[in-house]
Structures are given as structure tokens and as C-alpha cells.
Amino acid sequence: MRKTIIVLACGIGLLLLGYTSYRGYQVWKQDHGMAMARGYYAKGDMRNTLLGLEQVLNVNSRNIEACRMMANLTELARNPAALNWRQQVLDLNPRSFKDRLALAQTAIIFQQYALATNTLAGADEADKQTADYHNIAGTAALVCGQLDEAEAHYSESIRLNPGNPAPQVNLAVVRLRRTNALDMADARIALQRVIMTSTNMVLCNQARRELVNDAMRCNDMPTALARSKELADQTNSVLADKLLRLDVLMKINSPEFKPALALCQREAATNPPEIFELANWQLSKFSPAETLGWLQGLPPQTRTNQPAALLAAQCQVQLNDWHGLQVSIEQQNWHELEFIRHALMARSLREQGLTEASTAEWGVALKFASDQKNSLVSLFHLAADWKWHSEAEQILWIVVNRYPEEKEAASSLEQALIGWHRTRSLMQLYEVMFKRSPEDPQVKNNLAMTCMLLGSQEHNPYSLAQEAYQKDSKNVSYASTYAYSLYLQGKYPDALKVMQQIAPKDLEHPSIAGYYGVILKANGQKAEARAYLNRSSQGQLLPEEQALFDQARAGL
């Protein structure tokens, strides 16, 4: 026995020593990889920086510094995978305001404006009182065309940090887009002042660009031509300046346009960020076929990598070139965006009638996306845009079940199910929400209504409807649901009494009007019932609601 104990003790000691050594090696490997990545990044060697980061992430995929650096690199390359990396960083460190702002800014770059808005909405209340928050929130509002909201945010950012010129320029940009002549004149003066007094060349050039855009809107082409030339001729000019110059040349049908465009195309051919900018610009000006022709003529080392490969695929989708899309992407590797490549493969195969192969590819796409919330959301948007309702619903259910804190997914699923007329799935969603928030009156109300429409008594919908109504009797939706529950119980006068407490203007809403018409008919008021039931046809109704109102209308 003594020998056995000694042997076991030695064995356990060796295991612990081995584990400790292994853990020590893993830590060393991470530290070594990060040191290597930082060193190469400082030298501008992006290829070896990526190798160092991959070494770290292979050991620990949750290394925040490595994920953050990957987000920076992919954003610089204008690779949409940057969104996934930014989201992963925020998921690992959800209280980081800096990382939240970074995700919002990246979302704006890739025109994911809903993501930017939702990300900002999730900030702590204290962080929402900062100048940085208001500056980014102003930009999110501006790109969405919400000028009043953008102006309010920029004004608050200036109040909180009057020494920062960036929101001052942004505020002037908003006012340039107004119709008030005095506001526009003041904005032009403010931008000109920045150009003359600021030593920040980035802000100065932003001011110059806005003045060019303003001149074009006002059809002052001589001014637009002169200012755009100043921008494009600078030694530190960026592609955005050259594209703005192309806009001006194109608008005046200048013979300089084609040579200038050809020069931009040559200069951008080996630069991924510039490929992204120029291809998107060309898509907005020319046909997808012309843009695709340029992308397919790029050097092989850039043509099959991001973002060129994704942009080319988008062109082929717009051209309905399904076989061409299949052939061009089936042997590629999009790394972090493999889920998008397989989704596009699924689309190309389905459009060619290859349903079984398409289903298999979609399964692969879902597998690649399943570990990243943002990847799943991106895949959902693709499916929704393609009107692949079953696939879109499948993704949203995954997000709702796996990420209960993601309120936007539940809201999107709710709206999608209403639009797709899937009442039973809608009831199942409300059941999930009720388990998570059993005291929420809105959840009680929604579950009660869908249960009653489907004839399900499992959750005692009459009691749920009453509880929601008692919580807030002024809520129009709660009142109409409670009134309908009384109607189903044969308490017609009581149901009518509840409905008559609703303001006349709210009774005009199509869904409310339908229930009011049903209850009016039950109380013998057929003439009034007909008017309200007819009004119900103007709204978006669930199939069971439509059948209920049609049946009531038929008997009048």
C-alpha cells in the first residue's frame, strides 16, 4: 500500500509538472507572438505582423490585444472581417467604451449603420455624456440623413470639449446640407477658417472636400473644379481626394476624366484599401459589368484576396451571373469571411436549380458563422436580402437562443415573423421571452394575443392579458388584447367598455380597428362595426387576424 501511494503521488506530481510546463509554454508562446507582432507592426511589415497574431490566436483565441490588432489590420485593408474582430473585442470586454466606439466607427466605414447605432445605444449612461460619444453618434446620425439629431450631437460634443476642432468641422458639414441660406453661409465661413488657421491637415482636407461638395450641389462648377484640383494636387492627397476630383470632371464632361480615372485604377491595383474605395465608387457611377471587368483585371495576388474577391462576387450577384460566380469563388479561401463565400456558393447553386448542393453549402456557411455573433448577424442580412425566409429565421433563432442579451436579434426575429405571417413561430418566440422576463407586461400581452389567435390555452392567455392591462390600462395594445380576451369569454359588454376607453384616433389604427369592429358586431352595432372592419384591411395583419376580421365582415 505504501509503495502504491508513493507511485501515485509521483505520477500526480509528474502530471502537475507537465501541466505547469505546458501552461508556461502556452503563456510564453502568446507573449512571444505578441512581441513579434508589435515589432513587425512598428516596422510596417503587415505580413509578418499577421503571422505573429495568428500564432497568438491559435494558442488563445480570446487574447484581447491580438483580436484588437487584427481588427486594426483588417480595417486598414478594408476587409469586412474587421467588423467581426471589433465585435469579438467588445464581447470579450463589454464595458470598454473605447472598444465600443471603435466598433461603431468601423460599422460606419462599412456602411453598417444599424450596427453603429445599436452599438452606441449599448453604451453606459455615463459614457453617453462624453464628447467622444456625441461626436461618433453625430456621425452615425449624419450618414443616416438625420440632420437634426446629428447637429444636436455635434453641438453637445463641442460644448463638452470646445478645444477639439473635429466636431466643429462636422457641425459645419451638417449646416451646409441645410436649406437655410444664413446657416449655409456661416458653415462655409467656418470651414474656410479651419483651412486658413488649422495645422491639422486631415481636418483641413476634410473642410476642403466639403466645400467642393457644396460647390457641386450649388452647381458652382468653376469653384468645384478649382478646389478639387487643390486637393488632388497635394503631395499627401488620398484616394478620396482624387475620387472627388473625378466626380467634378465627370459632371462637366471634361476630357481629363478618362485619363484621371485610368491613373487612379493603376495606382489602386495593388492596394486593398484603395481597391475597396475605388470599386465602390465605380459601382455607384458605372455598371456592375464595368466594375467587374476592372476587378478581374487586377494582379492575381490581389484579385483573389479581400476586398477584391468579395466586391467581384457582389458584381456577379448584381449581374445574375450565377455560374460565373460559382466558378470564380469555389476554389478561393476568404479566411474570416468563409461563411460569406459559402453563402454565395449556396445562392449561386440554388439559382442554377441545384437545390441539394445549395442546402449543403448553406450548412457549411452556418457552421463557419456559428461561433461569432456578428458573423451570424451578417449572414442573416444576406438571407433576408435574398428573401430566404426559412434560413433567415433559422439564424435569428440561433442568435436569440445563444445570446439572450442581444435584444436586437429578438426584435428583428419578431418583425420578420410578423412580416412572413408565421404566427406559431411568433408565439414560440414570445414563450422564450416570457421565460426570460415573466413580469414584462409587453411580453405578457404579446404572448396572450398570439395564444388566443392560435386557440392555445397552455399559458392561460386570459390571465396574461388581464395582468398586462392592469399594469398599464392606458396602453392601447394592452387594452385591445384584454378586450379581445373578454370577447372570447363571451363578455361582450365588458369588452366594448374597455375598447371605448381608447382614444378615437387610436381606434383608427388598422389592427385596433379590426378588433373594435369584431366587438362592436358582437354587441349588435353592425353599421359601426362595418366601418372599422373595413379600415382593418389597410394594415399589416397576421393570417389569423385577417381570417377573424374577414369572417366578422362577411356576416354584415
Image (spheres, rainbow, N blue to C red):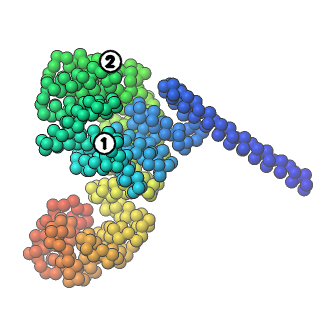
| Picture quarter with the N terminus | bottom right
330 or 147: nearer the eye? Answer: 147
Query: From the viewer's perspective, is residue 39 above or below residue 169?
Result: above
The answer to which image quadrant residue 424 occupies is bottom left
Left of 451 or right of it: where is 523? left
Which residue is the site of mark 1? 167
Q: Position of residue 458 (x, y in %)?
A: 39, 73
View extreme (right): residue: 2
Residue 285 appearing in the image: yes
271 or 423: nearer the eye? Answer: 271
Query: What amino acid does circle 1 point to?
Result: Pro
Which residue is the site of mark 2? 266
Q: Position of residue 132 (x, y in %)?
A: 37, 46
Query: From the viewer's perspective, is residue 117 above or below residue 225?
Result: below
Query: What amino acid does circle 2 point to?
Result: Arg
Residue occupying image coordinates x 27% and y 18%: 262
Left of 59 or right of it: where is 138? left
Mark 1 or mark 2: name the one nearer the start of the chain: 1
Q: Position of residue 208 (x, y in %)?
A: 25, 30
